Amino acid sequence: MKRSVCIVFICVFLILPIVSACGVSRPETAEATPVPTEAFPADDTIQTVTVPTPDDTPALPTVPPTPTPTPEPTEIPVTDPIITLIGGDSIRVEADFGFSDPGYFADDYLGNNLTSRMTVSGEVIPYKVGTYDIVYSVTDDGGRSTTVVRHVEVVPVEMPEIVMPPEKTVYLTFDDGPSTYTEKLLDVLKKHNAKATFFIIGNRGRTEIIKRAYEEGHAIGVHTYTHEYKDIYKNEQAFFDDFWATQEVIKEATGSYTRIFRFPGGSANTASRRNKGIMTRLTKIMEDLGYRYFDWNISSGDASGEPYTSTDVKNRVINGIKKHSDFAIVLQHDIHYQSVKAVDSILTWGEQNGYTFLALDLTSPIMHSEVQN
Ligand code: ZN
């Protein structure tokens, strides 16, 4: 009996406190750890209420949830390459010394740029009025090809209207300068308040004289750079090269290019005959390009090769002017002393007889000789 009491004692006073201290099997009560209300969000509560139980009769018909559309993979249609012509498939350009394509590009159906593999064929002669076709082609990696055509219409440059001057208008023109006599000539023109036109040779230098003539109100036109007929009239390109070399000299002297010129030898020259028909072609081309050439209806005879005096020049010019009461375009050369010397007396006579001496421009009356080649 003594032993049993002892075991009970051990159980009550030793084992139970140890178990309690370890906290292993002691159940927690609701009072001990209350569930905070914040643990249930408002949304969850509402959701719980609206979910029907099997016993519930729903007050409203159930709306089936809208299915989220699943995007189908996009099918890119396979097409031939697409060529885009900047400026369109039909363009109109004014005649010019060069043609610059407005641009183009190509893509395949996936949007890859194929421009670098495009081929372009066809020629535009930019100074020749007409219609030209340029053909653009491209092939993609799949061997699909596209070809498009651009029509290029080259039209003449629009020219200003010609204005007929009052009667007794004289245009003195001087070719082949500037020379050592040209400054003296400018002094004489200034004294008479007369204007003239200088068709210059580019390789003469003396740009300061061209500048002075321009600044004093005279017209500057292209004549030639070399005056070598066999070179200038060899072909169209040779003529253009000579023309532009002269233009550059004029621009250097005056600050701008000119649009008036005189063909070396005039448009009726026969020095160009070794190239059959070139004057027929050039006279049209240059006008289409917006340049106006002037021949003359009075020759002073100062380049005939025959001996003459300044009085001879004066008489020929004055007699010619008298015959052309509408307008007179006089040919002289300021490289000939006797010819330059005659100008003072020609102007004096002109003043006494009511003539006006003007410089040529794009609105001046045209004097064109009959082309011989
Ligand atoms: Zn000449």
Image: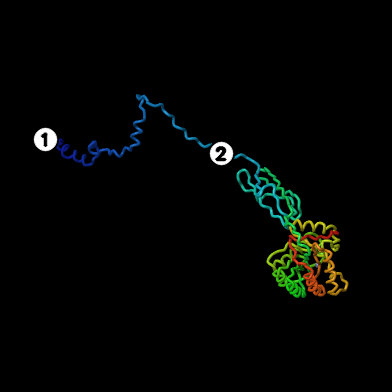
Residue 276 x/y as whole percent: 85, 58
Q: Which secondary structure lies at badge 2?
A: loop
**Residue 113 located left or right of residue 284:** left
Camera-nearest residue between 347 and 13: 347
Give the image quarter of residue 268: bottom right
Position in image of residue 260 (x %, y %):
75, 62
- Which quarter of the rendered picture does the N terminus lie within? top left
> Which residue is drawn at the image coordinates 21% and 40% (left, top)?
20
For this rendering, which residue is in front, 146 or 369? 369
For residue 345, which quarter of the picture?
bottom right
Residue in front for this viewpoint, 160 or 108: 160
Residue 74 tag number: 2
| Label 1 Cα crowd, 10 Å radius (few <14 / some 14-19 / many 20+) | few
Mark sitting earlier along the chain (2/1): 1
Q: Nearer the viewer, residue 308 or 249?
A: 308
Residue at 36% over, 30% down:
51
**Amino acid at the residue labelled 1:** Lys
**Label annotation for residue 220:** none
Residue type, label 2: Thr
Examine the rendered structure and indicate whether residue 370 appears above or below residue 119. below
| Residue 91 higher or lower than 169, as above or below | above
Cβ–Cβ under 8 Å for marks 2 and 1: no
Find the distance from the CA under tag 2 to the CA under tag 1.
94 Å
Residue 207 figure quarter: bottom right
What quarter of the picture does the C terminus occupy? bottom right
Residue 206 x %, y %: 73, 72
* Position of residue 2 in the picture relative to residue 79 (left or right): left
Instruction: Please give the residue where the numbered disc 1 appears in the rendered image.
Output: 2
Check the image and report above or below for 17 versus 188: above
- State the residue at coordinates (69%, 65%): 256
